[in-house]
Amino acid sequence: MKKIVLITLLLITTINWFGFLPPTLTPEKQTVCWKIQGNGLKKPSYLFGTLHTAKQKLILQNPTLNVFLHQVDAFTIERLDDTAYINHFNPSEYLTQPLRDLLSAKDYNFVSRVFYEDARLDINALPPYSPIFLMEQFMTSPSKRNASIALDTTYPILSGGRMEAAFIIAAKSRHLPLFGLETYREQDSMNYKVTPAREQAICLLKFINDYSAGVTPVNIKKCYMQEDLNCVCKTTLPHFSEYYDSVMRVGRNFNFMKRLPAMIQKQSTFIAVGTKHLCGANGLVALLRKKGYILTPCKVWNP
């Protein structure tokens, strides 16, 4: 019996050591908001995972978050409006191989049908936009399932998402500086130029498969409102191919880390990024800890 127990413990340790368990699983309570201290910081900063498509009132009407928002001296979001870049928006820059050539006939017909039935977008009538560009158009359309979680369309996707607008409002109302961790040009370059069209098509197909199965966006919002970071990560990350995840989440996280430490050393900052950027060993929580910062989970929805 003792041998069986020892062997079992050895197997569990070995599996965990070699990384076969999901990277988000830890015994610590995982949440979407973290207080950052240590490394000589005079005041704490906060790292907050957003749900891009949720309403801004989730932030502005939350008593706990409002306390945090009034403790900081600056705000940072993923990206700021780049007026010149947006005003010169050229759809031709988002063209690639036709989606029909990137998917099997069966998969293409399936994606095309869901686009038309749920979002009234006819892929066959559109120019050959990149798959990720198509996915963004689908996500921001008044589709049947999207309507079920009451998306706030006050701020378009090119304003950094809906929930992020709350932090723009907070910064302006308190006359505090607002920074971006990247520019639109940098993000677009990673999205459309670094990531091959085939990898983008795989992500689009995964997203539409999950969407049709009812996995997203309702399940993601449920996980999010329960402040269950592990659940959000497990529900969100499977949408991405390994390559796309390495570029758009992990790669951008490393870029964010080139700027974040200097920001929080200079002044107390509220940092708002998509929740997926908090996930796993290459998430911002883990990366900041590797730099010597102390991150403590904070409950915000049901403190």
Image (cartoon, grey):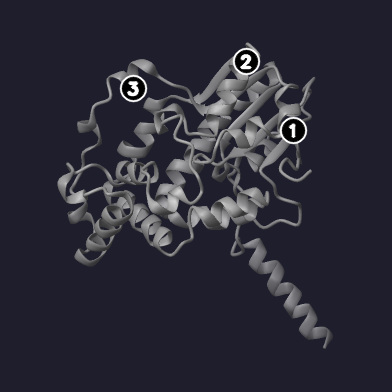
> Which label lies toward us, 3 or 1?
1
Tell me the amino acid under the disc marked 2: Ser
- In the drawing, does residue 279 fall left or right of residue 201? right
Q: Is residue 292 visible?
A: no
Name, please, the residue furthest toward the top. 175
Q: Looking at the picture, which amino acid does disc 1 mark? A: Pro
Q: Residue at x 18, y 55 (%)?
A: 100
Q: Which mark, by number, is residue 63?
A: 1
Residue annotated with mark 2: 173
Q: Splitting the image into 4 quarters, where does residue 141 fall?
A: top left
In the rendering, at what x and y percent does residue 108 appear?
23, 60
Q: In front here: 112 or 150? A: 150
Horizontal arrangement in the rendering, residue 144 relative to residue 105 (left or right): right
Query: In front: mark 2 or mark 3?
Result: 2
Image quarter hosting the N terminus: bottom right
Q: Determine contact: label 2, label 3, CB under 8 Å.
A: no
- Tell me the crowding category of disc 1: few under 14, some 14 to 19, or many 20 or more residues within 10 angstroms, Cα based: few
Residue 269 place in picture, x, y as percent: 67, 23
Q: Which is nearer the N-term, disc 1 or disc 2?
A: 1
* Secondary structure of residue under mark 2: helix
Residue beneath the point at 62% across and 29% down: 271
Comes first in the chain, label 2 or label 3: 3
Q: CA distance from mark 3 to mark 1?
A: 34 Å
Q: Is residue 163 above or below residue 239?
A: above
The circle on residue 86 is 3
Looking at the image, is 169 positioned above or below residue 12? Answer: above
Pick whichever, 157 or 55, lies toward us: 55
Residue sticking out furthest to the bottom: 1
Of 90 and 142, nearer the camera is 142
